[in-house]
Amino acid sequence: MDGQMDGWTDGWMDVRTDGRMDGGVGCKECCERCVGSLPWASLIATVLLYMGVALFCGCGHEALSGTVAILQNYFEVVRAPGETLDVFTIIDILKYIIYGLAAGFFVLGVLLLVEGFFTTGAIRDLYGEFKISACGRCLTAFLMFLAYLFFLVWLGVTAFASLPVFMYFNVWSMCQNTSLTEGANLCLDLRQFGAVTISEERKLCTGSEKFVKMCESNELDLTFHLFVCTLAGAGAAVIAMVHFLMALAANWGYLKDASRLQKYEDIKSKEEQELHDIHSTRSKERLNAYT
């Protein structure tokens, strides 16, 4: 037991005064090796994706809740009874979509980050005993296709998120310029936005008391800026998917080249072994003939 402890101490705990181990590898070299083996492109893309999705989901959820409050308090829109598809039901559906996006893209970010670590380790160990498998290349190609698909999805989400920003900007501009429009009677009609049916009339004009209260309240200003943050989060997610696409395309190219190089090394080793066997056979034949 003492001999085992002495060997373990000599092998692992004998630290020199300059911070280097007996193996000749210091702390600086270890840190550089660990930092160099990290997939920085995938890490940056993952952080950007999580920030964008969190901003989109959190601000989007609160902005939809603020929209419901504005519709109920100032436009006097009530929820339709039963299973009728109205604006409140659509808002609830959008909230559930936000929950699904948050969960789905959390899993997707983990998968893409793990693929980045796997590919980086494969490239680092290429000249060792590591073998590049066809499964790894197929997985990278599938994730690249998936990232491209979700990139298109986020482009659509960004375009959709710009619509409420545009509508709230118009309302916010009307509130900011009420002093300039005293002679004009401008009205907001929810039928123009598709929030209510054509038979319903839900107008709010600039000269009314409710319009003034809505402009003076914090609900309109907060909801407008929350939708702006939602649009910014969607844009950040688009940029993150572009980063992932670039990283995955580079990884797939590296894996493909590594696979070809590995095949070349295998063929070369096989040929060298065959030449060695031929020379050994001829040497034995010459020795037998001499004897």
Image: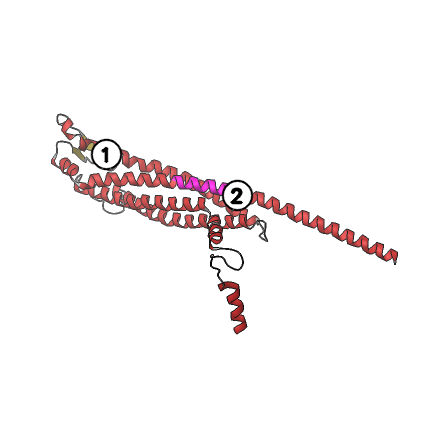
In the picture as drawn, the residue positioned furthest to the bottom comes out as 1
**247 within the magenta span:** yes
The image quarter in which residue 77 lies = top left
Question: Alpha-carbon neighbours of circle 2 within 10 Å: few (<14), some, or many (≥20)?
Answer: many
Q: Quadrant of the C terminus?
A: bottom right
Rendered position, 121 above or below 150? below
Rendered position, 61 above or below 170? below
Locate residue 68 relative to residue 286 in the image: left or right.
left
Q: Where is residue 280 drawn, in percent x and y?
A: 78, 54
**Label annotation for residue 191:** 1
Badge 2 amino acid: Trp
Q: Where is residue 229 drawn, in percent x and y?
A: 29, 40
Q: Where is residue 226 drawn, in percent x and y?
A: 26, 41
Give the residue drawn at x 27%, y 33%: 166
Q: Which residue is mark 2?
A: 252
The image quarter in which residue 287 lies = bottom right
Magenta highlight range: 238-252
Give the residue drawn at x 58%, y 43%: 257
Of 176 and 10, which appears nearest the observer? 10
Badge 1 amino acid: Arg
Main SS class of the magenta portion in the image: helix
Locate residue 17 relative to residue 264 in the image: left or right.
left
**Label annotation for residue 273:** none
Of 92 and 225, which appears nearest the observer? 225
Q: Answer yes or no: is residue 240 visible.
A: yes
Tell me the mark number nearer the camera, choosing from 2 and 1.
2
For the residues marked 2 and 1, what is the alpha-carbon distance in whole angstroms?
51 Å
In the picture as drawn, the residue positioned furthest to the left comes out as 209
**194 within the magenta span:** no
Looking at the picture, the colour scheme in use is: secondary structure
Rendered position, 105 above or below 214? below
